[in-house]
Image: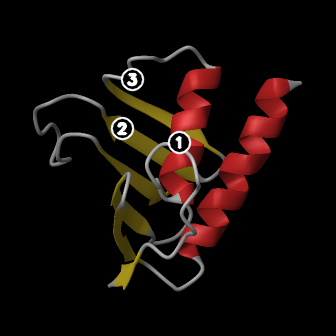
Amino acid sequence: MLEIQGTMTDRLSQITESFDLIRRFAVLHGWVPVGFRSFDVGDWQVTVNGTRDARDNIPPFHARVENMRYVGTMLMSPRGGSVLGYEHTEAEFCEAMRTALDVARE
C-alpha cells in the first residue's frame, strides 16, 4: 500500500492536490454541499462522502477513487490517504481530473 503523495495546495488548510481536484470539480458542477455522490472521470469512478456518517464503507468527509480499467483504488481525506495500486495511480488520477476540469470549463 502506498501513501497519497500529491503535493499540498496552499489553499484551504493544506488539502492534498488529488482531494482539491475533486473539490474543484464538485464546485464547478454546483454540487455544494456535495453530500454522498458518485461520478466518473475517464477510467476513474469517484465516490465522495461529504456527510458526517460513514456510507458504503467510506468514512465521513473522505473519497474513494477506483480505476475501472485496472486495479487501482485510493481512499483519501483532505489531508492524505492510501493507494492500492502501482506507484503512478495518484498521478494518473490527477491528470484525468485536470483534463475533466478543463473540458467542463469550456
Residue 61 horizontal/vertical position (percent): 26, 40
Residue positioned 55% across, 39% down in the render: 40
Q: Residue furthest left?
A: 53
| Dots 1, 2 in contact, CB < 8 A | yes
Residue positioned 18% across, 40% down in the render: 60
Label 1 residue SS: helix
What amino acid is labelled 2 in the image? Val
* Depth check, front residue: 79 or 105: 79
- Which numbered dot is residue 50? none
Mark 1 = which residue? 22
The disc, 3 or 1, on the residue closer to the chain's N-terminal end is 1
**Left of 50 or right of it: where is 4?**
right
Whether 31 is drawn above or below 83: the answer is above
Residue positioned 21% across, 28% down in the render: 51
- Which numbered dot is residue 34? 3
Q: CA distance from mark 1 to mark 2?
A: 9 Å
Label 3 residue SS: loop
Q: CA distance from mark 3 to mark 1?
A: 10 Å
